[in-house]
Image (spheres, rainbow, N blue to C red):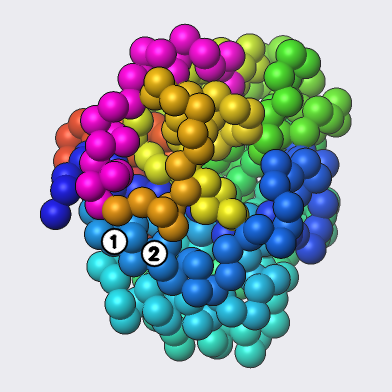
Amino acid sequence: MPYTKVTEAQILGTRECNIRCDYCRLVRDIPFERKDELDIDGWKTAFSKMDSFGIKTVKGLGGEWSVKEYLPELVEFITNNTNIKFALLSNSSFDNPYRTKLVDGGLNSYFASVDWADPKILDSNGKSAPGLKMLLELKELGVENLGANTVIMPQNIDHIPQILEFLTENEIVMNLCPAHGGDNYAFEYRAKTKSGNIANCMPGELEELVDTLFDMKDDGCFFAAPASYLDAIKTHAIPLDWKCGEFSQLRIDANGDLKICPDGGPMHYVNAGIETNEKYNILSMSPNDFRDLYASFDANKWRARCPGCGPWSAQYRAEKNKRYGIGDPVLSGRKNR
């Protein structure tokens, strides 16, 4: 089998979503026609191809993939026909019968959006209460790996240690991501919003939070990202000048196009690091094509074109996995600290 060191992929299963978070513009500005999104047969082909490329872990993002009725069938296909460990990231808005179908299909990793520990205080777009409820229910149903995606905003920055304590008590890991938006570049995942941008936090608040999280991580709290990521948040999350070091994680858009970055723009398709204007699509690639694509990618050229962004925990993990040959620290066990 052709070999590369890229063993993790994050995919946008769909650009559709049933809520609109202030800090996200992913479903507002779509770079292709909605009709061009992959259907279940397309995604079955895509997962089979990723398996043949040597991809070991895949995180399914959105949009909100649970708006698609076919997703439980796709989860069952992944479980029974590939060696891929699949994690679903969701706003937990689906009902119990849909949840049962996902679990029966073999879902073993799930991340919920949780921005508040106590929804009675404030709940970001109604996600946190159902997210916490879903995580606890899935734990009872035996889903092996559970995590919460928490976005740092000025409104919740004082509550994040409380969220981490609650998650740790229930053996659920936290994955942390700053909300940011830039004036000079239209970040695909991060809308321009004054209220949610962490650049609008009080001076010193972000640094104080990071120091607190360092202490909590050392005390054994279930924090998914490496310590280097916390350092990067303190340094790069507000100026938005962090740049990935290498081609370490595959990204696939909802229409199958291959990307290399969590954010948008032409330099974030894989062809930005290759001497070609051709876009690459998962459906048209063979294992040899992917090996050749990886071999021809020029990280220096790509970094020279990239304006930088806020740090991403997933990219940090992927780069660490690539360098040291370890599995995804979240998917390999929720007690990894």
Please rate how many residues cluster around mark 1, counting C-alpha atoms within 10 Å: few if below 14, some from 14 to 19, many from 20: many
Disc 1 to disc 2: CB gap under 8 Å: yes
Residue 321 among those drawn in magenta: no
Give residue 86's quadrant in the image. bottom left
Q: Is residue 102 left or right of residue 66?
A: left
**Prevalent SS, magenta region:** helix
Residue closer to the observer: 106 or 215: 106
Quarter occupied by the N terminus: bottom left
Q: Is residue 188 above or below residue 142?
A: above
Residue 11: which numbered mark, if any?
none
Q: Which element carries disc 1, helix, strand or loop?
A: helix
Q: CA distance from mark 1 to mark 2?
A: 6 Å
Q: Amino acid at mark 1?
A: Asp
Residue 10, percent from left and from top: 46, 49
Q: Which residue is mark 1?
A: 51
Residue 118, percent from left and from top: 73, 56
Q: Residue shown at 36%/19% (left/top)?
A: 299
Residue closer to the observer: 112 or 104: 104
Q: Residue shown at 83%/30% (left/top)?
A: 193
Q: Amino acid at mark 2?
A: Phe
Residue 296 among those drawn in magenta: yes
Q: Which residue is mark 2?
A: 47
Residue 100, percent from left and from top: 55, 87
Q: Which element carries disc 2, helix, strand or loop?
A: helix
Q: Residue furthest left?
A: 1
Give residue 179's quadrant in the image. top right
Residue 271, percent from left and from top: 45, 29
Give residue 94's quadrant in the image. bottom right
Q: Which residues are magenta?
A: 287-313
- Residue 179 visible? The answer is no
Residue closer to the observer: 288 or 301: 288
